[in-house]
Amino acid sequence: MEQLIPLVHDELRRLAHRHMAGERVGHTLEATALVNEAFVRLIDVRQVKWQDRAHFFAMSSRLMRRILVDFARSKGYQKRGGGAQKVSFDEALVVATEPGQDLVALDDALNALAAFDVRKAQVVEMRFFGGLSVEETAEALNVSVDTVMRDWKLAKAWLYQQIRQEADE
């Protein structure tokens, strides 16, 4: 782990900043704390057989998302409210950039997608949260670039519909 930390720390901070960019102003968790918490959780994950760099960063991004969702839930944010703003899932987005997105609602929709189609949910996690390219995502999932593009388009449409439906309820 001592050898790994210097090699991946900058990239993990970039991922953490990307995740934090979608949080509300004044969030008490900072990017450094998010990286540190992700490292703690990565150390505890012993049974994972790391495939490659893309797999490591996809797992790291997933852990960061999980940490932020857990943090939001612990602060009393609920599925339909709790003072959080509604998520707008623009189909052209590749990376979350607007502050104030409701991570809990997006997480709920993504979990529903995973129950329906695991690979499509993984594509969204890797592209939207992890910032991986189409090629890196294809490599990490061991599928073709065309498959990733199809999954990405279908998953975005499905999530968009799910989030709109929840907002209407």
Image: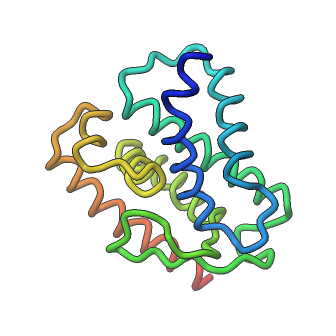
User: In terms of depth relative to the viewer, which is nearer, 137 or 86?
Assistant: 137
Q: Looking at the picture, tell me which residue is in the foreground, 26 or 83.
A: 26
Residue that lies at the very extreme toward the right in this rendered image: 75
Quarter of the image with the C terminus is bottom right
x and y percentages locating residue 1 in the rendered image: 60, 17
Q: Residue 158: x, y in percent?
A: 38, 66
Observer-nearest of 64 and 109: 64
Give the residue at x 25% y 49%: 134
* Colouring mode (rainbow / by chain / secondary structure / one colour): rainbow
* Residue 37 figure quarter: top right
Instruction: Say whether residue 21 is left or right of residue 153.
Output: right
Please tell me whether residue 13 is drawn above or below residue 81 in the rendered image: above
Q: Residue at x 17, y 45 (%)?
A: 145
Quadrant of the image occupied by residue 142? top left
Q: Is residue 154 left or right of residue 144?
A: right
The residue positioned 59% from the left and 67% from the top of the image is 22
Q: Residue at x 54, y 41 (%)?
A: 12
